[in-house]
């Protein structure tokens, strides 16, 4: 029945600034009102809604305001440079500094590589790339560089 995630919503303080930010991530603006904007993640299949409000509070639990964008492994290898070119800094996640990322997540059934960053309102964003590696047993998270030394 369920085919995937269609939409997610995030609160933002300044819609114009957020539209500029999400446009810099190369997402296409699908719909806009004075207090709401939707961006296609995959046109016609999934989008993110940004709602301007003065009730954007931090700290918060990241599960409440987090979006992971699916990318391929080639994009994840270049993600830090790609983000830096747009003036976006990475953030520490799971004890790994931005310099140590991408990080390998031992999610079952397959491992994933991920890079973490924030939008202008502190919403948690992630680029995540599934790896062609079935997780048979638990292993510690590691950087992609460490992973490559063991698996390439």
Image (cartoon, grey):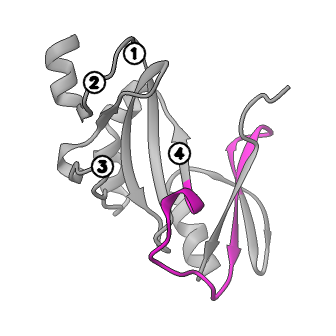
Label annotation for residue 94: 3
Q: Which residue is mark 2?
A: 139
Find residue 51 and report its horizontal and vertical position in percent.
71, 73
Disc sitting over residue 20 in the figure: none
Q: Given this view, does label 3 or label 2 mark the residue nearer the observer?
A: 2
Residue that appears at 64% across and 77% down: 15
Relative vertical location of residue 23 with respect to residue 33 in this rendering, above or below: above
Left or right relative to 32: residue 130: left
Q: Which residue is mark 1?
A: 135
**Quick one: label 3 or label 2, which is nearer the N terminus?**
3
Instruction: Kindly identify which residue carries mark 4.
Output: 68
Looking at the image, the residue that sits furthest to the right is: 1
Quarter location, residue 19: bottom right
User: Does residue 89 appear left or right of residue 4 in this picture?
Assistant: left
From the image, which quarter does the C terminus lie in?
top left
- 3D distance between C-alphas at marks 3 and 4: 15 Å
């Amino acid at each position: 029945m369920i085919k995937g995630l269609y939409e997610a919503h995030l609160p933002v303080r300044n819609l114009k600034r957020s539209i500029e930010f999400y446009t810099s991530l190369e997402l296409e603006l699908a719909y806009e009102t004075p207090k709401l904007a939707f961006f296609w993640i995959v046109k016609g299949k999934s989008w993110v809604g940004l709602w301007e409000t003065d009730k954007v509070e931090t700290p918060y639990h990241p599960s409440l305001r987090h979006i992971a964008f699916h990318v391929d492994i080639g994009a994840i290898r270049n993600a830090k440079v790609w983000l830096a070119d747009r003036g976006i800094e990475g953030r520490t996640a799971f004890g790994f500094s931005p310099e140590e990322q991408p990080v390998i997540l031992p999610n079952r059934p397959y491992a994933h590589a991920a890079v973490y960053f924030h939008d202008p309102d502190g919403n948690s964003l992630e680029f995540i790339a599934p790896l062609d590696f079935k997780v048979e047993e638990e292993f510690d998270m590691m950087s992609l560089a460490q992973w490559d030394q063991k698996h390439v």
